[in-house]
Image (cartoon, grey):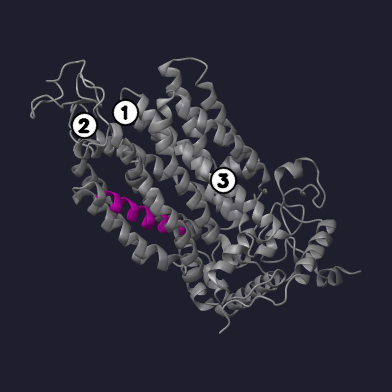
Amino acid sequence: MSPRAVSAEQQSDENGLQRSDDSVLFEDVLERCCGTGRWQVLLVSYMSVMWLIFPSFTLSMIFVGATPKHKCVDGFDVNATFADLPEEAPRCHPLGDNSSSCTRWAFDKSVYESTVVTEWNLVCARKPLLSMLQSWMMIGAIVGSVVGGQLSDRFGRRPVFLPSMLFVIACSFSAALVSDYISFAVVRCLTGFAMASMIASQYVLVTELGGCKHRAALTTVTYLPYAFGIMLVAAASYGIRTRWLLQLAFAVPCVLFLPNFWLMPESPRWLLVQRRLEEACEVLRQGAHWNRRKMPPDDQVLKMMEDARRGLLAREAALKGDGERPALERALDLVRTPRMRTYTLASAYISFAISGSYYGISFDMTQLSSSPHLAGALSGLVEVPAYLIYPMLNHFGRCRCYVFFLFSTTVAMFLLFVKNDATLWLVLGLVGKLSISSAFSMRNSYLSEYMPTQQRGLALGVSQMAVRVGGAVSPFVVDLVSDVHELAPSAVFGAVVLVASLAALLLPETAGRPLPETVADVETTGRPIATAAAGGPGRGPAPAAGSEKPPPGRPKHNDTETGAQAAEAIAATQRLQGSTNSALSLNDE
């Protein structure tokens, strides 16, 4: 049989689905038009400024909510200060009356002039109200994660990001102006909602702007400013000891968000899915200009986009659905099929575990340290390497690195029980912070690589919801479980992350593979690393990079399917087709 005849037959592409050799993926369109270069680097660099500012919301309670030394002043002069009270004065009961609860407190102002604790007396029986201030932000973010992810899939990344951005700016200034607990809690909740909506749309956009080869670098480095943001929060808190002034200082940099109105593009991948091909072409033309690439004529680009979209529709038709399905139906796609269900549940738990441990370690380190500002700065500094791990992800693979980082966190937490030594605790705390930060930094990029385009924003939203649940629970673990034993929170976080490291073994390897476009792509490709290591069925060893010549215009990928895999993928596709009654038609006019 001639090569010409062979190429005319249906074969399996990198997604494991039937295709002709002349079929096109979005990666092909991106590579032919603008590639990955200066345009993506500049855009991602600017859009990552949000991660420089976000620590002033998510971790500011380390200092804004710090609890100074305090004593009960019931029975003493109304103007009595902390220094005026006797050494034996209790914290939660009047002196000499352990049966009564304290109603007034005097706080040590040697470290903090004022915090939310000193303003609203959030100590003793009112201590859970302090934990709730961190939780209120996460509760708002839970809703924002789901709503933002859903809206970004339906209306686009940019229309969701920009209004959320303005809302964050308004809330940041409001937090400095409110003077009562309830108003402050409401502002925290609304801030969490808007911030999570920004994350859900921005991170998906970053993922969809780059090609396979550079995707890990773009999506991992975008987190890098967060580490410097933590150090800036610690530095600002060291210089400003009054709560409302500190929050005003945190709010002013938020105006750096405003140029997004002129600089932030819509995702060309999303525009292609929505059949807004001319708009997608215009976005890619901007990329080609900045990357100094000669873009093919518009008619060729539009034809490639039509081919890419046609292939997407054909693959999606192998599953089922309708382009105008309600939101509930689209959400059910996350758990309707076996692999999607496994990936969704594993991702949600891992996100919960990572977030709870991350925030728990961050809060616990500063509380156990005699110099909380130094501990805060070091916890930010140690995160810098965590956002430069993308060479490891490309060399060792996403899944193996994920498991390693999670298990390393568990080991560091359990080693705290070896010796009661403050220096050892600090070092192990920093090791744990580095490991969990590394897992945190790759979590979104990894998830975006094994979730399909049409459900990617929603999946990221669900994952962010799990992150916020973990962040909402962690303050209670630190504040309440520590009453049992000072290292009890570390034991809890270590056990939770240990289970997460086992759950990560269920996720697929994605290094060097194109993003899945549809649920059908996910169901017919990829499998857990544990199965791969065991040499399970349906997948032989990947050929060496470059061993197969890609079709013209198609970038090389490191993983290809063998003939046996193609047969299995075709059979799986046919089984999916047999379970459906209609094919998908996206946004037909």
Q: Secondary structure at mark 1?
A: helix
Q: Earlier in the sequence, mark 1 or mark 3?
A: 3
* Residue 210 in the image, given as x and y percentages of width and height: 54, 58
Mark 2 burial class by Cα count in 10 Å: few <14, some 14-19, many 20+: many
Left or right of 547 on screen, residue 200: left
The residue tagged 2 is 112
The residue tagged 3 is 349
The residue tagged 1 is 372
Q: CA distance from mark 2 to mark 3?
A: 37 Å
Q: Are marks 1 and 3 in contact (CB under 8 Å)?
A: no
Q: Secondary structure at mark 2?
A: loop
* Residue 450 in the image, given as x and y percentages of width and height: 62, 54
Q: Secondary structure at mark 3?
A: helix
- At horizontal 82% and vertical 64% (from top left) the residue drawn is 571
Q: Amino acid at mark 3?
A: Tyr
Q: Amino acid at mark 1?
A: Pro
Q: Is residue 294 visible?
A: no
Q: Main secondary structure of the magenta part?
A: helix
Left or right of 511 on screen, residue 177: left
* Eye-nearest disc, 1 or 3: 3
* Residue 187 in the image, given as x and y percentages of width and height: 29, 53
Q: Earlier in the sequence, mark 1 or mark 2?
A: 2
Identify the magenta region. Answer: 184-200
Determine the image quadrant of residue 108: top left
Q: CA distance from mark 1 to mark 2?
A: 11 Å
- At horizontal 82% and vertical 59% (from top left) the residue drawn is 568
Q: For this rendering, which residue is in front, 434 or 560?
A: 434
